[in-house]
Amino acid sequence: MPEFSDCRRAAFHPFSYLAAGTVPRPSRCSGDSPEGCVLKRMRFRCAARATIATLIVLSNARAGAADAVNSVDRRSIGELNRTAVIHLGKTADWVSITPDAVWVGSTGPFAVHRIDPKTNRRVASVRLPGEPCAGLAVGFGSLWVPLCSAIPRLAKVDLMSNQLISVLKTGPAAAEGGIAASPDNIWLVIDKEGSLARIDPDTGTVRQVTHLPAGSYNPFYNDGQIWVTRADGSEVTSVDASSGTILATVPTGPGPRFLTAGDGAVWTLNQGDGSVTRIKTSTKQATTIALRIPGKGGDISFGGGMIWATVWKVPLSLVDGVTATLLCQWEGPGGDSLGIGHGAIWLTDYHAGTISRIELEDAIGHCKQRSIQ
């Protein structure tokens, strides 16, 4: 009868058992010789021990990966050179990029400001009858600005004349919401019950309402779909931009709010735990990356093959768009909203009422240099 001092001499494959979700147990040895029966039992016991060991290793590996994400060193935002700092008002929030301008909202005054990226100077300010409070969208020759006032409204600013040309009676459901422009419509959630309005950009009338889960506030257009995060939950809903019908619901981290798109995916900034979720648009497969930047406010954008996130006191977090890996974070004063364009990161300091220009290559270069070290 064979004897075994350890399990290494038994022929088994623990990963095959893991894949099947169970470890087979030899319930009978009929037809086997005594030696064969003992060998079966030995292999079963060895497989069980190896399976447990494998699970422990995998568990430790997962924990190690989480620790690796959380151990990214935060460096000072002061190491990044600001080629321009422009003061706009008491606060500065919401950034939208056009081919020839950078638009930013403010309070004190309630306004949107146009910055010429060639000169880094403010060239126009447009006063508004309420606080710009729920994003900015560019489309149909206009800048669309949701307003929080006694009665919520939607402002329409002409991009050529820099003039306020109309204020629509339809307004945002709440502050920190969003607005989106598709090729033929403006999209805005107009109440806390999740009513997504499809607005005619010429007449301002509501063409259609799609009913989403209550607590959905932030629409974002990408490749024929409107993606709407549910800040009161942990999911995003995709809507067909042509028909207004719901296509899918995809889980995210808790409290998803702001969105961007890049590298074949839609990305959400989740206020509940400060994570980012990547959703592959082709498969709807979701992956969540820990950034440790929870709380209200914030923003997310795509540029230079990277995802850029901002919150107050952690002004920049950099995530690789291909691998969905957190690469660098910068902490310090400032942050809350950003846009990527004209070769630069346009980053607001909400409480200082300013927007800064940081060259995109400079930020990526600092991150790569530190990674090499």
Image (cartoon, rainbow, N blue to C red):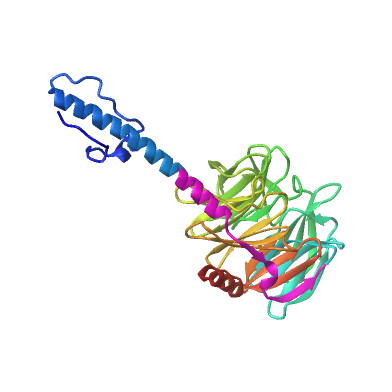
Residue 181, horizontal then vertical, whole percent: 64, 56
Residue at the (72%, 71%) spot, across then down: 356
Residue 68 among magenta residues: yes
Q: Which residues are the magenta region?
A: 60-88
Examine the image and state in which quarter residue 236 appears: top right
| Left or right of residue 368, residue 216 in this image | right
Residue at the (80%, 63%) spot, across then down: 164
Residue 114 among magenta residues: no
| Left or right of residue 29, residue 324 in this image | right
Residue 300, horizontal then vertical, whole percent: 63, 58
Asked whether residue 284 appears in the rendered view, the answer is no
Which is nearer the eye, 294 or 242?
Answer: 294
Residue at the (81%, 66%) spot, across then down: 126
Residue 320, horizontal then vertical, whole percent: 52, 61
Which is nearer the eye, 35 or 93?
Answer: 35
Residue 78, horizontal then vertical, whole percent: 70, 71
Residue at the (55%, 64%) spot, across then down: 306
Which is nearer the eye, 282 or 82?
Answer: 82
Asked whether residue 54 appears in the rendered view, the answer is yes
Q: Quadrant of the N terminus?
A: top left
Vertical placement of residue 142 versus 121, above or below? above
Q: Residue furthest bottom?
A: 119
